Amino acid sequence: MSGLISIKGFDSEIVNICPNNTSGKIVEIDGLYIQLPAQPDDKDILYHNLPKENQMWSRNVVPDSIDKTKTMDAWMEQPKEVQSKFLPYIKEEFRRRKEGLWFYNNGVPTYITGNHYMMLQWSKIDGSFYGNYLDFQRKLFIHAEACKVDPRCVGQLFVKCRRSGYTNMASSMILSEGTVAKDKVLGIMSKTGSDAQENVFMKKVVRMYKSYPFFFKPIQDGTTNPRMELAFREPSQRITKSNKAAQQGEALNSVINWRNTVNNAYDGERMYMLFLDEAGKWEKPTDIREAWRINRTCLIVGRKVVGTALVGSTVNPMDKGGQQFKDLWLDSNPSERNSNGRTRSMLYRMFVPAYEALEGFFDKYGNPIVDTPEEAVLNNDGEYVNIGARQYLENERNGLKSDKNELNEVIRQFPFSSDEAFRDSVEGSLFDLGKIYEQVNYNDMMYPSPVVRGNFHWAAGVKDTEVLWEPNAEGRWYLSWMQSQDKRNSRAKGRSGHWSPGNSEMGVGGCDSYDLDSTVDGRGSKGACHFYNKFNMNDVSNMFVAEYAERPPLASIFYEDVLMAAVFFGYPILIENNKYGIARYFEQRGYIDYLLDRPKHLGGAASSSKTKGIPSNSQEILQAHAQSIEAYIHKYVGEREDGSYGNMYLNRTLEDWISFKINNRTKYDLSISSGLALLAAQVKTDKPKLSNFEGKEFFRRHKYWTRDSM
C-alpha cells in the first residue's frame, strides 16, 4: 500500500502514492517529496501509438451503449451479449479510478491520479462541460493524494489566485471519494452556509454526480435534486404485511452533505473527507483557524488519521479573515514539524503562482505558457498567444504603477508568490502599502541578503566589558548595518557612576518591553526593540539598523539583550514606560542614562515615579507615534523618483507596519518599537562629556598638497 518510505540521499521521508506500492519517480511539491507509481511499459501508456505532436489529453469516447444507459436497472435489462461486450470497458474505468492513468503528453510520460481522471473524464463542470487537462491541477491532485496517504497529515491547504478551479477540483474529489467509500461522512463548508449549499453542493457536487455513468452511481436515497445531502443508502421502505422488515442491500451507507459556517459544525462526527472552501474569507465570529482546530478532531481518532481535509481559498484582507488564514498557512509548512513529524496545523500547504494558472495561457498540451515564446503558440482555446503569462501580468502591474491602490489589488488577486497572496488590502490601512510592498519586493530580490541574524554577548562572558556581535541562524537580533570597529562600544562614565552612550548624535533606539516572565496562556506580547541611524554626515542615515522581536523565558534575558545592543551601538533608547521593569533593570546595572526622558516636543510631564520613556495611553502620543512611521515610509521606503530604493531592509518590521492598527496596537510590537525609535530621533541629544581627554584631538589636521603628492 501507499505510505511513507525512506530513501538514501533524502533528508525527509518520501510519500509513496501508488495504490499498488510500486516505486517510480520522486517529485518535490512545495517542500513535500512524493514518489509516483512506476512508469508502465510503453504499450500501457495512453497515446503511445500517436505521433508526438498529437499526444495530448482528450476525453475518451464513451461507447454509445454505455452513454445511453442511464441507470443500473436499465443496464441489467440489456442482453447478456451486450453486457459481456462492455464489461471489460467498465472494469478498466474502475481500475483507472483506483490506480490513476499514464498518458503521453507531447512525448512526455505523464501520470494523473484516479481522482484527477474522474474529474477530466466523468465530472461535468457546472453541469455543462468537461474540463481541460492543466498541468498545475495535476500537481494539485498529486499533492492532495500525498496528503491523503501520509499518516502524519490531515489534509491540503491551497492558497490560490482567482479562477484557478480549486472549487471544481475539490468538489469532484469529494464526489469521487464519496461514491466509493463505505459507511463514511463527507462534508462541505464555505464562507457562508448558503455558499456551501448553492455554489458548492448543488451547483458543483450534485451536477457532477448527474454526469456520472450508471456504473459509478451507488444506490441513492432521496430526490434526484437533493438540497441537503447526497445519501448513498437503501431508500426507506414502508413496512407492510408482506414486507415486515427492510431488506439489507448493497448500499454504501455513506453521505455527502454541507453545514452552516460555525466553528463546531461537524463537532463530534467522524469524517472521511472535509472540504473547507473560501477558507481565507471566513470572518469572525467564525474564525477559520479556530474552526479548523475544532473540525480537524473529526478527522483524527487518537493518533490515527481517519480522514482528509481540502482547504483552499484566495485571501481576504487581513481584518476580514485573511490574518487567520495566513496564520494557518504559517502553521502548515512541511519543513517545520514537531517530534511526531507533524506540522502545527497537521496540514501541508501548497501555492501555485498566478502565471502558472492563468486562463488563456495554456498550450494545447495543458502546460502553462509562462515566458514569452519566440513564435506565437496555439493555446487550449484555439487562439494564438504571443506573450507569456508572466509578462502579461507584469504589463498589467506596470500599467497601474500610478495607482498604487489598484496595483495592490491586482497583485493580491494574481500573486507571483505566497507573500503577495497574503498582501493586505489598501482599504483601511494606516500607511502607504504600495511603498511598503515595493520595498519588500526589492529586499526579497537582493542577493546576498543585507540582513544578518545573530546575538550580542559580553567578551569572555564578563559583563560591563566589551560587547561583541556573533552571527547565528537562530539568533534573536536582525542587523542590516554595523558600525566601524572604532565606534563600537563607545560609552562614558559620568560623575554619578552611571554609563552614558557615546554615539547619541548618530543614532537612537526604541523599545516596547514587557515585565512578566510568562503569561497564563503561554503567549503574550513579545519584547521588541529597534536601533535607528539619524541623519548624519559620516554614516548611513535615516536607516533602521537592528531589529528584535522575541519573548525569552525570563524578562531579564530580554533586558540584557537590549542593554548589550545599546552598549554595542552606543545609542540611547526611548522606552514605552507602561512596563517599567526594563528601566529598573538598566538602573540596577548602572545604565540608566542610556534611557531617554520623555521628549519635550510631545508635551506633558513625566510622573515622579517614571522619569524615563513615554506612556502609550495619551492620544497625542499615539498620533505622533503613527505619524512618525507614516512620514518615514513616505520619505525613505519603496521606490524613489530616481529609480533607487530605500535602505529599510527589515522585512518583519515592514510586514508589521502593513497590518498596524492604531486603536488595537497590542499585536504590533515591531511597529511600536520602531515608532518609538523614530520619536527618539526627533530629540536633540548632546554627545556626553567623556571622563578624560586622553588621545582626543581638538584641531582638524589637513594634508599639505605638494607636486610630489600628485
Image (spheres, rainbow, N blue to C red):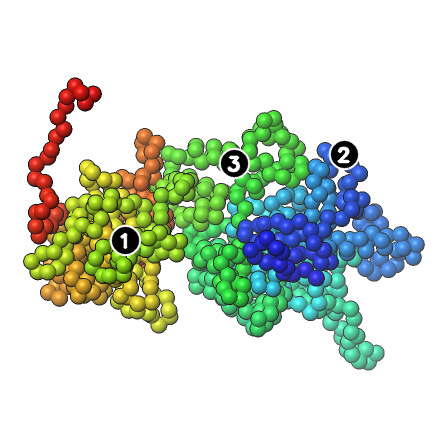
Nearer the camera: disc 3 or disc 1: 1
Residue 191 placement, left or right of 67: left
Q: CA distance from mark 1 to mark 2?
A: 68 Å
Task: Name the residue at 7% across, 58% down.
Answer: 495
Towards the viewer: 623 or 116: 116
Badge 1 is on which residue?
Answer: 468
Q: Position of residue 547 (x, y in %)?
A: 31, 52
Q: In what quadrant of the picture does the N terminus appear?
A: bottom right
* Residue matched to label 3: 390
Kindly identify the amino acid type of the residue bearing the numbered disc 1. Leu
> How crowded is the residue under tag 1: few (<14 C-alpha within 10 Å), some, or many (20+)?
some
Q: Which of the image's four quarters has the C terminus?
A: top left
Provide the residue designation for mark 2: 51
Q: Position of residue 405 (x, y in %)?
A: 38, 41
Residue 296 percent across, percent down from the top left: 54, 66
Callouts 2 and 3 close, C-beta under 8 Å: no
What amino acid does circle 2 point to?
Answer: Pro
- Residue 375 in sight: yes
Secondary element under disc 3, as helix, strand or loop, is: helix
Residue 397 vs residue 74, the one in the foreground: 397
Is disc 1 placed on a helix, strand or loop? strand
Q: Amino acid at mark 3?
A: Arg
**Which tag, 1 or 2, sits closer to the chain's start?**
2
Give the foreground label among 2 and 3.
2
Residue 194 in view = no
Q: Using residue 53 as the reference point, say whether residue 547 is left or right of it.
A: left
Q: Earlier in the sequence, mark 2 or mark 3?
A: 2
**Residue 319 - label:** none
Cα–Cα gap, marks 2 and 3: 30 Å
Write the residue at 37% across / 54% down.
Answer: 472
Judged by depth in the image, the label closer to the viewer, 1 or 2, is: 1
Taking the image as shown, residue 705 lies to the left or right of residue 306, namely: left
